[in-house]
Amino acid sequence: MISLIAAVAENGAIGFENKLLYWLPNDLKRFKALTTGHTIVMGRRTFESLPKGALPNRRNIVLSRNPDFQAPAVEVFASLEEVLRVVEQTVANETEEGVRPDNEVFVIGGASVYMAALPLADRLCLTLVHDSPKAADAFFPVFDPQEWRVEHEERHDADERHAFPYTFIDYVRA
């Protein structure tokens, strides 16, 4: 299963100058709960934006066209197709060995990786932030709502820890 996970402003914005637009503690908790124990796939710039490098308790995969790119605790691939082949093979091997395979891949950014993965995705785990920032240079790809159905939706108001109201929305392909 391929899932895209992102915090998205109402205008589709997801980042500015290689940084997230919003600091939402509940979104970060949700991200951790959903992705821990699974494979995460990200572009090189997204990886470089992580303050402590590879995220713990996850298989970290970085997409990079630079064959010399390396980083501790990550696997590097040149294409999303190559990643999916390797993950599929790993799942098949683990199943044969009687190990419970990790069959969910979370794409965590950036914009070009989301764009490449969207046609292959089974699920979208979005946090819709009820705001439209003036400054943004990275956007989540536009998707056809007819191709998706809402599986779960949970609205939250702004509070002392969250400057903007937001809604967790999980879509599955229709």
Image (cartoon, rainbow, N blue to C red):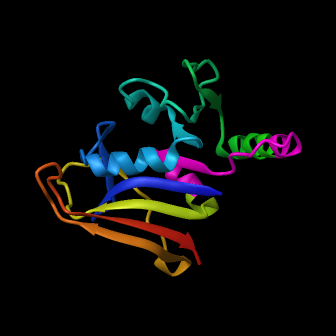
Q: Can residue 110 be seen in this view?
A: no
Vertical arrangement, residue 71 with respect to residue 103, above or below: above
Left or right of 14 in this view: 56: right
Vertical arrangement, residue 51 with respect to residue 90, above or below: above
Left or right of 30 in this view: 66: right
Which percent across, then down, holds residue 136? Answer: 26, 49
Left or right of 11 in this view: 147: right
Depth order, front residue of 98/139: 98
Depth order, front residue of 136/3: 3
- Residue visible at 33% across and 57% down in the picture: 8
Q: Does 99 lie within the magenta span?
A: yes
Which portion, as a residue range, is magenta? 92-117
Left or right of 172 in this view: 81: right
Which percent across, then down, holds residue 158? Answer: 15, 60
- Residue visible at 56% across and 36% down in the picture: 58
Which percent across, then down, holds residue 17? Answer: 29, 37
- Residue visible at 69% across and 41% down in the picture: 83
Q: Quadrant of the C terminus?
A: bottom right
Q: Does 68 lie within the magenta span?
A: no
